[in-house]
Amino acid sequence: MLTATEASEGTGPYSYQWYIKSPSAVDYSVIKDTTSLSYTFTTAASTELGKWSFTVNVTDSATVPVTVASNVILVMVNAAPSVSVSASSATFTVGQSCTFTANAASGSGSYTRYQWYVNGAAQAGQNSATFIFSPSTTGSYTITATVTDTLDATSTQSSAVAVQVSPTPTPTPTATPAPTTTPTSTPTLTPIPASTPTPTASTSSPTPTATPNIENAPETGTYIIICMVLAVVVAALITVILISKKKQKATKP
């Protein structure tokens, strides 16, 4: 509100008229219906930013009225304060916390107070530029903030930050597969050949040799070896017998 000092000289009563000049204007223009000592300058979102100039003319009631102009009053119109929150979204689990930071802009003077909101509800005592959110339950939340400047102008709420709080994860046990056993190859036993007996020449009749029970032999390789030995022995005996008969014929007259 702008207020002029009441005139003290000239001839009363006095009449008043307020004038205004916007930051981009060259001349003053009359403000309609402003004929009292005070004038309230109200801004809106469309109000031009910058220095506004105001003056008031006072006219007395003399036969020849006298009009005088007051000094110029300058009013600086700044952009309304605004605020944004550093994060656009956040996801964490119950038991954890997340810190949000408000970034203020525009306004007049300094920023005297912040206000934080969770799901649109103001949080008591949360009036600084940072807010630590530690939810105790799962769900979806929105975080917003406002800021107030020196002239007590408060911003609109910031864009909402979407927060998703999940339950604490529960570990799922997993079975560990047993190690695969590689089969061990069984070594193959190579049969050791039996020693070959040396045949002995004899004039006596050959003694019949017992034939081994092949069915009870432990290994097939042994059967073959025994058969070979018997064949050699039989051949040697036949040879001895033939030699003996030749000698007997040679000694006869």
Image: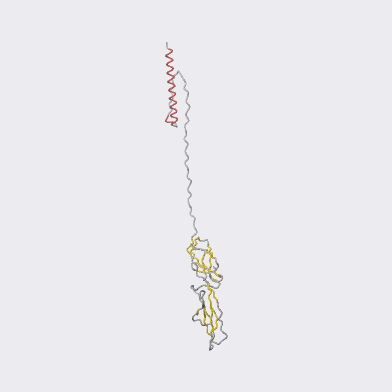
Model colouring: secondary structure
Q: In this rendering, is residue 187 above or below 240? A: below
Quadrant in the picture for the C terminus: top left
Where does residue 222 sit, x and y in percent of width and height?
Answer: 45, 30
Residue lying farthest to the bottom in this orientation: 63
Q: Looking at this rendering, what residue extends furthest in the front direction?
A: 26
* Residue 170 in the image, given as x and y percentages of width and height: 49, 57
Tell me the quarter of the picture where residue 225 sits: top left
Image location of residue 90, percent across then percent down: 50, 62
Looking at this view, name the residue that lies furthest to the top: 253
Number of callouts: 0
Observer-nearest residue: 140 or 197?
140
Q: Nearer the viewer, residue 250 or 9?
A: 9
Q: Position of residue 182 (x, y in %)?
A: 47, 42
Q: Is residue 173 above or below residue 133?
A: above
Q: Considering depth in this image, is 204 or 133 the residue closer to the camera?
A: 133
